[in-house]
Image (cartoon, grey):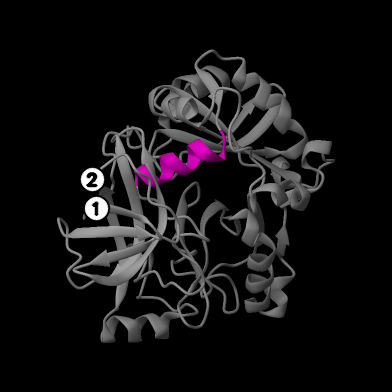
Amino acid sequence: MEILKETALTEKHRDRKALMAPFGGWSMPIHYEEGILAEHRWCREKAALFDICHMGELLYNGDFSAEGGLEDIFTFSIASIPEGRSRYGFLLNENGGIIDDLIVFRLEKEKAMIVVNAANADNDFAVIRDRLKSGQATQFSDISAATGKIDIQGPLSRDVMSDLFGPEVASIPYFRFQNMETPDLRAIISRTGYTGELGYEIFLPAEKTPRLWDQLLADPRVKPAGLGARDLLRLEVGYSLHGNDIDDTVTPLEAGLSAFVDFGKEFVGKEALLQQKAEGINQGKTAFRVESRRSPRHGYEIWKDGRNIGVVTSGCFSPMLGCGIGLGLAGIEGCESGAKLVIRHEAVSMEATVCELPFYKNGSVRR
């Protein structure tokens, strides 16, 4: 595919590591001119554009089912993904900890693109390459520097994309993708995202990314959004963020993400997870709403009945709910929905209630 060939890079995308540095792995700004709350609202109501060129893209060519290939590396089956579909899951360590969460796109019968978190891209590439047998590893490459990525998210995103790429975009189901073309651009368009809204991820040659960005922003239905809005949006629907809610010390069982683990296949970390299932987990993902407009923050303590039972991993003020919301890792005993908690940090104390996810339930993601 043309998009996956080596390309000459624009200055904007020449040094991915330098772009990632300011925000601990993100190249996108915290916000643009109108600010975080305005960008958040625009995404919930219209269509917001996110520069996600910092993400990592890895390319594998080969027989997925062959011994020593990709099949035993992730918590889900690669070989069973139909062409034109994608699947979410994990790369684990031997202890079952989450090295990264990622999405695999089945491009062709023997070709897959693995999309990983920016801050983890180099390590993910090394881990996967080391787990491949020597013959298979030669067919594995890092195409991040040559690949641009733009996300458009919001209830009007389908209309915007159909006007630009044609009506075929409207027929792409959730977690599927198609190759799309305009007179001067070929791209992979995926019906996925990280906001809880209807949306698309666009993969294209890096040097063509700035022009497409400008084309999309020329549409009055579209405005740019940064990291601040993206974090509010993902937290309102309860999506985990690697480095906050999940990392290589947290297992999918503790993170409440066991639905993305296929125990019917082999993968690194499986034995540790089976042992954890048999013994039971002591801590788990806990979602809560604060009984005020105050914002819980990463690292705040979670208390129940006078005992410190856990820690907040993500928290914010939710514009859609009008109160503070958060995710944490806490002792699971007594943390059923409706349980009362206290969130503490130094002199700060706020009452909270355990609740079910998602916090915000009116997103357009499945429309």
Residue 42 in the image, given as x and y percentages of width and height: 45, 24
Marks 2 and 1 in Cβ contact (< 8 Å):
yes
Query: For the C terminus, which image quadrant?
Result: top left
Label 2 CA crowd tier, 10 Å (few <14, some 14–19, many 20+): some
What element does badge 2 sit on?
loop
Label 1 CA crowd tier, 10 Å (few <14, some 14–19, many 20+): many
Where, by quadrant of the figure, is residue 180 drawn? top right
Residue 127 in the image, given as x and y percentages of width and height: 64, 73
* Mark sitting earlier along the chain (2/1): 2
- Nearest the camera: 351 or 191? 351
- Circle 1: residue type: Ala
Numbered tag placed on residue 352 in the rendering: 1
Q: Is residue 144 left or right of residue 72?
A: right
Q: Is residue 194 visible?
A: no
| Residue pictured at 28% horizontal, 36% vertical | 321
Task: Name above or below for residue 249 compared with residue 357.
Answer: below
Quickly name the residue at label 2: 291
The verdict on residue 236 being magenta is yes
Q: Is residue 222 visible?
A: yes
- Circle 2: residue type: Glu
Identity of the residue furthest to the front in this view: 347
Magenta segment range?
226-237
Residue 30 in the image, given as x and y percentages of width and height: 59, 38
| Residue pictured at 65% horizontal, 60% vertical | 121
Tally of numbered tags: 2
Residue 295 in the image, given as x and y percentages of width and height: 38, 45
What element does badge 1 sit on?
strand
Task: Name above or below for residue 14 compared with residue 108.
Answer: above
